């Protein structure tokens, strides 16, 4: 029964927590907020929401969650990071603050605020490897991109390389490495729950 509806936490220190809780529920998981080590210890998987990675990183340290979270990710707990969450999961970042902490888990370099200040947000339809049902409509908000990734990182989606896409064309915006999933965009905002379903399936698999 518990594997039918895995218990998935949403890190609730800052960011768009409610939208992820709703999307996880729609994707067949039981979802709870995580603010304390005791809550982190209970969940089968965790979502790191979008927000501000510098703030979330500071709060992770202040709430004594940074080391327990690193330990759970290293121990194989599935984790999904969206936008600021992707930044936190990168082993290395460009454009971060010097005192910003990384949770790590994806062997990639992620560029913060990569799409430029003048383009605060934009939307695009992405081919997303492994998801049936056509392109994923992706909302990017002061988003990062994956600048480079090691061979062990699976690239799931890129910005379409259309004329006019400029520097953004072809950039990697969704990746998976083992049980760690990350998107530069916000699937919790569109009502399309396929990415959350993919993550819920990753959590179920980890329990079998
Ligand atoms: N630019 C933000 C950061 O650096 C991320 C934006 C987002 O999560 N929507 O954390």
Image (cartoon, helix red, strand yellow):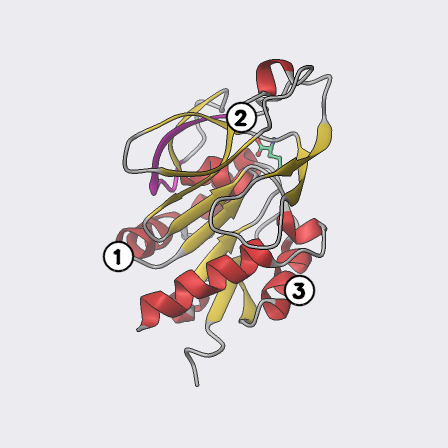
Q: Which residue is mark 3?
A: 22
Residue that appears at 26% across and 57% down: 75
Residue 151 marker: none
Q: Quadrant of ligand 1?
A: top right
Please name whichever residue, 181 or 53, is drawn nearer the observer in this view of the structure: 181
Between the residue at mark 1 and the residue at mark 2, the CA separation in whole angstroms equals: 27 Å
SS for callout 2: loop
> Are circles 1 and 2 on residues that touch, CB within 8 Å?
no
SS for callout 1: loop
Mark 2: C-beta under 8 Å from nearest atom of ligand 1? yes
Viewer can see residue 149: yes
**Magenta region includes residue 7:** no
Magenta stretch: dominant secondary structure: strand
Q: Which residue is mark 2?
A: 112
Residue that appears at 48% across and 35% down: 87
Mark 3 surroundings within 10 Å by alpha-carbon count, few (fewer than 14), some (14 through 19), many (20 or more) = some
Q: Which residue is mark 1?
A: 75
Between the residue at mark 2 and the residue at mark 3, the CA separation in whole angstroms equals: 26 Å
Describe residue 197's horizontal placement relative to residue 178 as left or right: right
Picture quarter with the N terminus: bottom left
Against 49, residue 42 (above or below) is: below
Q: Earlier in the sequence, mark 1 or mark 2?
A: 1
**Magenta region includes residue 110:** yes
SS for callout 3: helix
* Magenta residues (range): 102-111
Q: Earlier in the sequence, mark 1 or mark 3?
A: 3
């Amino acid at each position: 029964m518990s594997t039918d509806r895995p218990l998935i936490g949403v890190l609730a220190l800052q960011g768009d927590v409610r939208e992820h809780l709703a999307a996880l529920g729609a994707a067949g998981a039981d979802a709870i907020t995580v603010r304390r080590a005791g809550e982190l210890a209970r969940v089968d998987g965790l979502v790191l929401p979008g927000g501000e990675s510098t703030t979330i990183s500071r709060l992770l340290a202040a709430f004594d969650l940074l080391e327990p979270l690193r330990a759970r990710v290293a121990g194989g707990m599935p984790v999904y990071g969206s936008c600021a969450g992707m930044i936190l999961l990168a082993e290395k970042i460009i454009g971060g603050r010097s005192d910003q902490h990384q949770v790590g888990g994806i062997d990639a370099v992620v560029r913060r605020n990569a799409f430029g200040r003048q383009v605060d947000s934009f939307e695009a339809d992405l081919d997303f490897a492994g998801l049936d049902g056509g392109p994923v409509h992706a909302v990017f908000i002061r988003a990062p991109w994956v600048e480079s990734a090691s061979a062990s990182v699976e690239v799931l989606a890129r910005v379409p390389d259309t004329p006019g896409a400029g520097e953004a064309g072809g950039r990697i915006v969704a990746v998976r490495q083992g049980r760690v999933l990350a998107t530069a965009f916000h699937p919790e905002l569109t009502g399309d729950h396929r990415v959350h379903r993919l993550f819920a399936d990753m959590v179920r698999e980890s329990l079998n």
